Amino acid sequence: MEQMTRPVFGVSGAEAELIAVGQIQIRYLRDGAGERQTGAFEMIVPPQSNVPPPHSHAHNEEYLYVLEGKMRYSVNAEVKDLNTGESAFTPKGAVHGFSNPFSEPARALVVLSPDIGAQYFRDVAAVLGAGGPPDRAKLVQVMERYGLKPAAPK
């Protein structure tokens, strides 16, 4: 017998919670972490902003689609500048990272399957907002708690 699932609807961009992670803004559109389902968020990256270090996800695949502006994205050391309308896919376990070395803000849609959830970004924001320089050890602890692993420094 085929199992039926009920549809789950996300929120509109205007209703979604805005999470400031340093200079980056995250607006969660669908938090699928509780059900280990796909999630999606909008991300705004100002020019020259601080971004997370290259990292990998033990449990998640990631798809990024540039809605506005331009972003630099890397997957397993292959780097590409993505323009509006272009995308990148990161398989589970692949080291990836992003930046905006350009002159305009970039806005992207990010889809994670399964989702790590909005709480991850809230936890990172709390470490970054604790005052003083960011505590790298605490950031790594948060990342590892959600299955993310910082890449080894070059």
Image (spheres, helix red, strand yellow):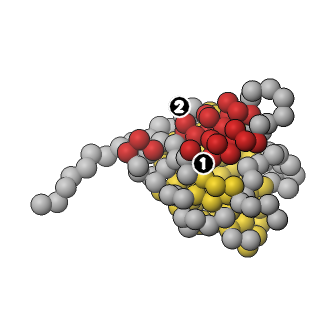
Instruction: Point out the image quarter for the C terminus.
Output: bottom right
Q: Is residue 57 left or right of 127 when viewed as pictured?
A: left
Instruction: Point out the image quarter for the N terminus.
Output: bottom left
Quick one: 35 or 132, which is closer to the camera?
Answer: 132
Q: Position of residue 42 (x, y in %)?
A: 61, 46
Looking at the picture, which amino acid does disc 1 mark? Glu
Give the numbered dot on residue 144. Answer: 1
Classify 10 Å Cα crowding around label 1: few (below 14), some (14-19), many (20 and above). Answer: some
In terms of image quadrants, where is residue 91? bottom right
Looking at the picture, which amino acid does disc 2 mark? Glu
When the figure is inspected, residue 64 is found, relative to residue 7, above or below; the finding is below
Where disc 1 sits, the SS reads: helix
When the figure is inspected, residue 82 is found, relative to residue 137, above or below; the finding is below
Q: Earlier in the sequence, mark 2 or mark 1?
A: 2
Residue at figure coordinates x 81%, y 46% from the top left: 50
Classify 10 Å Cα crowding around label 2: few (below 14), some (14-19), many (20 and above). Answer: few
Where disc 2 sits, the SS reads: loop
Residue at figure coordinates x 86%, y 49% from the top left: 48
Residue at figure coordinates x 62%, y 35% from the top left: 123
- Residue under pointer 2: 15
Q: Position of residue 58 (x, y in %)?
A: 54, 59
Residue 20 visible in rendering: no
Q: Position of residue 47 (x, y in %)?
A: 84, 48
Quick one: 121 or 84, which is closer to the camera?
Answer: 121
Quick one: 8 or 118, which is closer to the camera?
Answer: 118
